[in-house]
Amino acid sequence: MNENDLRVIKTKKALHTALLALLKKQSLESISVSALCSQASVTRGTFYLHYKDVAGLFDEHLSSLLQDLEESYMEPYRHGLRNLPLQLDPSTIRIFHHVKKYQPFYEIVFDKKSPLSYYYSLFEKIKRLMLDNTEEYSDLLRDHAMLTSYQANAIMGLLIQWYEEGFERSPEAMNDELSFLVKNRLTE
């Protein structure tokens, strides 16, 4: 099976879209392969050609999303800034663009009826990214793990507020807000 085959790409996209539609109504554990295939307009045989079970499809979706999140988070660091918080340029922030790109998934993650495991998967990924990118400063901090948890929760808080506002603000407006908050917190 060629993963670059247009038919494979279209089938997987249909299955991912169907999965998100079903996750808005029910838990991952209660989604059957039959319901997923019906929603995606593919046969069960086609599904099993690509995945072992529904959890496998979810894992693939989450893995792809977290990879994109990591690339988005790393974008400001690619500009070679040493003192990133004070030099943070809103135009280099990509995390809100990432969330907008995957908005249907984030609507599920931040829905109060969703399992907390979705939230914690995202939180842990952000926390790991922050830990990895501030390691060189860890000996200057009182408690590196506490600071990283605090910062990851701050990002999550902004994302939840944006979700609660229906994602009405543009990613660029959210970039400006994050930049403003980071710079003003550091200069107080």
Image (spheres, rainbow, N blue to C red):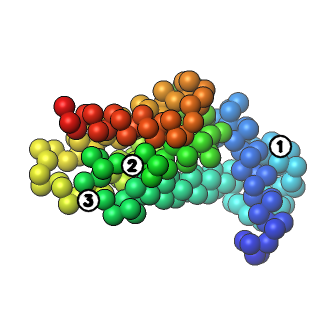
Reply above or below: 138 against 188.
below
Per the image, the residue denoted by label 1 is: 39
Residue 89 seen in this snapshot? yes
Q: Residues within 10 Å of mark 1 (few under 14, many from 20)?
A: some
Q: Amino acid at mark 2?
A: Asp
Of badges 1 and 2, nearer the viewer stands 2
* Label 1 SS: helix
Q: Position of residue 6 (x, y in %)?
A: 81, 68
| Image quadrant in which you'd find residue 39 | top right
Q: Amino acid at mark 1?
A: Gln
Per the image, the residue denoted by label 3 is: 82
Q: Position of residue 27 (x, y in %)?
A: 64, 35
Q: In the rendered image, which quarter contains the N terminus?
A: bottom right
Q: Amino acid at mark 3?
A: Arg
Q: Are marks 2 and 3 in contact (CB under 8 Å)?
A: no
* Label 2 SS: loop
- As measured in the structure, the alpha-carbon distance from the residue carrying label 1 to the one carrying label 3 is 48 Å
| Image quadrant in which you'd find residue 77 | bottom left
Pick whichever, 143 or 96, lies toward us: 96
Q: Position of residue 75 (x, y in %)?
A: 44, 57
Per the image, the residue denoted by label 2 is: 89
Pick whichever, 8 or 179, lies toward us: 179
Of badges 1 and 3, nearer the viewer stands 3
- As measured in the structure, the alpha-carbon distance from the residue carrying label 1 to the one carrying label 2 is 42 Å
Is residue 148 toward the left or the right of residue 129 in the image?
left
Q: Position of residue 33 (x, y in %)?
A: 77, 48
Counting the numbered discs, the total is 3
Residue 112: assigned label: none
Q: Considering only order in the chain, which callout, 3 or 2, is on the residue closer to the N terminus?
A: 3
